Amino acid sequence: MRQPLSRELKDLLERGRDRQLRLAVTGLSRSGKTAFLTSLVNQLRHAGLEARLDLLPAAREGRLLGARRVNQQDLGVPRFPYDPAMAALSATPPRWPEPTRGISELRLTIRYRPARPGWFEGDSRQLTLDLFDYPGEWLLDLPLLAHDYPSWCRSQASLGGEQRAAHFADWQAAVAGLDPAGEADEARLAEIAEHYAAGLRGAREAGFADLQPGRFLLPGDLTGAPVLQFFPLPGIAEADPEALAALPETSNYATLARRFRYYQQHIVRPFYRDHFRRFDRQIVLVDLLGALNAGPERFQDLARALANLMQSFDYGRRSLLSRLFAPRIDRLAIAATKADHVTPEQHPRLVALLEALLAEPLKDLRFADVPVRALSVAAIRASEAREVEHHGRRTPALRGTGLDGEPLLLFPGEVPERLPDDAFWARQGFAFPAFRPLPLEGGALPHIRMDAALDWLIGDKLQ
Amino acid sequence: MRQPLSRELKDLLERGRDRQLRLAVTGLSRSGKTAFLTSLVNQLRHAGLEARLDLLPAAREGRLLGARRVNQQDLGVPRFPYDPAMAALSATPPRWPEPTRGISELRLTIRYRPARPGWFEGDSRQLTLDLFDYPGEWLLDLPLLAHDYPSWCRSQASLGGEQRAAHFADWQAAVAGLDPAGEADEARLAEIAEHYAAGLRGAREAGFADLQPGRFLLPGDLTGAPVLQFFPLPGIAEADPEALAALPETSNYATLARRFRYYQQHIVRPFYRDHFRRFDRQIVLVDLLGALNAGPERFQDLARALANLMQSFDYGRRSLLSRLFAPRIDRLAIAATKADHVTPEQHPRLVALLEALLAEPLKDLRFADVPVRALSVAAIRASEAREVEHHGRRTPALRGTGLDGEPLLLFPGEVPERLPDDAFWARQGFAFPAFRPLPLEGGALPHIRMDAALDWLIGDKLQ
């Protein structure tokens, strides 16, 4: 077959000439990854026509000609299910797309006219945009690389409050009688590990996010493999480290420690090596409103999870990440999603709260010279902003349709500008509803500030 | 941590001293792999006590002391679900275990007394037995390595008869308008490929076995990946090979051909490299009675599938296999399963029929000097042999319980000793029922000739 230039070489050249960009979208489950990526593709597909992208200069200036899906590069990575997502949004009544599992990929070719055409180049140029979507839960496993098994056990023992602990009651009962020095029984360890995984699943269902090991939540083809059958051993903190290390290879302790190391080497590291380090830019989605809805313990949990997650973007010399590889993400965005669930005048507060929540990680990132920006977006806007008369005053409100099909008109409350204090939680001043997507009327998906996100993530490549 | 000898080195030494054996169980779906492996573990666990293993000398002579499950070696391979299988068989009413998906593993340590104890060795010895279970469908992909994409298309076009073709009608309609030279549209190729996969699944449900590519039936984590989105292009046989090769990289033809090559390199080869070549011995299970029940087209299909499958065991110098690696399986068994579904005097006919069906592959194997043996077994016997009076003559019969709970007493028919001819199919003389497992009464699982299978597969290591 005629192959004038190998695929890899061509990709390399395109990148060298700024014509290729690898952009990853991540976030904890239910943060809105699928909606974000669907909308991103949809806006770029409609860029030349109906899309409203005034905050993206190339679009505003009429230089963005459109985008086309082309064959992705890595044939072994699932394709991002754009068509099924659009089908769900176009259904009667419209539905939210099914969440993705694991990593997925989609490649776009974007045509645009440069702001100042060069001498030798034609009228239009191409940018190849590789889009990736992967679970933020995988990033929660990075801190696990800094541990050995005993220190990981200690770190997990100190996590969370009563609500979280309640999900692990069955596991606590099952693990109680396990002697670290005892001979390992695979079937029994598997059973205790299944209680642990059930605890993680239950906690996630209840809105908790700071959950390790992340793969226990999406085991895929590893279901039933010993590498996913470990858990922290309670009481290890008090044990003598040398005595532990001297336990025989077939003991419970040594068996669990071996599985922990295998998980580090064969699950966590390969993701960073094969995928993460190849992303040029990333956007992290955060469902801040959901956490405000869920109450103080889960809000604290989200804060801890995000602090963990952000370590993956810390390029400092002494960071965990730099021990794995020389990092090279050149731009990062952090977005509070579902902004359409609060009234427009609350949006600046949403960004302020996101920045307050991430104050420490953001300091680290800025110190490490990683360009980062915080935003609020609604990838697929599902409500309309209105004003209503209330006691003779005009106040802002949202109009939309509930998931049950009931029309809603409401004011969901004020977003705190700073980290919420006890007074805020005592008032319980916040309750946002879930909206069903608006019916599609042809054209691009309605959104809030997707153009601002696009400008930060790819705008400079369209100059 | 104290590690006097690395795990790998220790394994290597054990193997060198004949103390370790890697035994794989395979077969097409519904051939009885899960029941076989469950029974094999169960018999060895009960070997010193209740198990009836008279055909295994070490057991008959009281030298087999028992077996214990120990931690498996490869932490990334799912453990064979022995406990859930036993739980299903012990339920009221008893159920057949859930079939396994993909590869799984289980390690046993067997203690035995050698027939002639050596000078320096103690009274008992250990054999470490690694058991593997994997889908026979994966072996059907080996012949695919001998093809390039156009020749594979031709090979698939000539397959099967009307009943099989009916499952692919939707795919035929979808692929009809696809121009090999046209620009590839990922979404459209994905849709046509889904029709193809649905055809394969439908054909398998209907009892067909000769289905490629095998991974389309068990996609696992590759669901939605382009590597599982190819299919044969009809009409390629008439096309000019040079014209095809000159088609651009983005054409439908070149896109499908690229995915086909990726499938060969990243799916088929790794299984042979990482797993298959490490098995010392294998047993292939065949549901011959099921095919007899299903009629001539499916029986022919099974014959073709088995001929394909057996290529994986052909060590001849010019074989497909020897191009991949230097093969080393030192013993092979082929077993017709579910022998308890016919009366005992039919068992020799079952073996004769199996040998007739595999006559050509068996010739190749014997020529290549691979020790191979054909057997009939019932891994978990679900019926009892009886005699009944019929028109004044005593005739053999089976007693059991149907899947619906109804007691059954019947003579299922005669197994043909040779490949069935038109006369046999015209008589429709054969119909065996599905039995529910017998209630467990403690002790070992009831079986037919599991001891003969064990003797051939591991007996020489227990001398």
Image (cartoon, coloured by chain):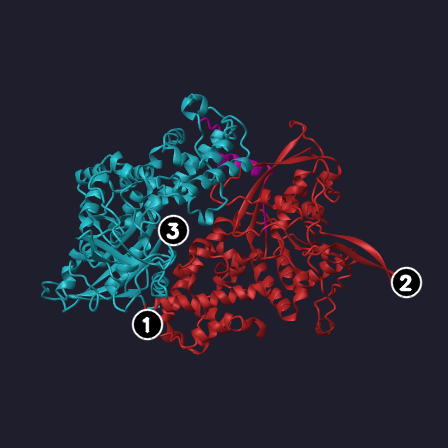
Chain colours: A red, B cyan
Q: Which quadrant is the N terminus of chain A positioned in?
A: top left
Does A20 appear in magenta? yes
Quick check: do tags 1 and 2 share a chain? yes
Which residue is at the front of the view, A353 or A121?
A: A353
**CB under 8 Å between discs 1 and 2:** no
Mark 2 to mark 3 CA distance (whole Å): 68 Å
Asked whether the viewer can see residue A198, the reply is yes
Quick check: do tags 3 and 1 share a chain? no
Q: How crowded is mark 2: few (under 14 residues within 10 Å), some or many (20 or more)?
A: few
x%, y% of residue A203? 55, 66
Quick check: do tags 2 and 3 share a chain? no
Mark 1 to mark 2 CA distance (whole Å): 75 Å
Range shown magenta: A1-25
Q: What residue type is labelled 1?
A: Glu
Residue at label 3?
B102
Residue shown at the point (65%, 27%) measured from the top left = A122
Q: What residue type is labelled 3?
A: Gly
Residue at label 2?
A392
Q: Is residue A47 left or right of residue B230?
A: right
Q: How crowded is mark 3: few (under 14 residues within 10 Å), some or many (20 or more)?
A: some
Q: What element carries label 3?
A: loop
Residue shown at the point (51%, 64%) measured from the top left = A212
Q: Which amino acid does label 2 sit on?
A: Gly
Q: Nearer the viewer, mark 1 or mark 2?
A: 2
Which of the labelled discs sits on residue A183, or is there none? Answer: 1
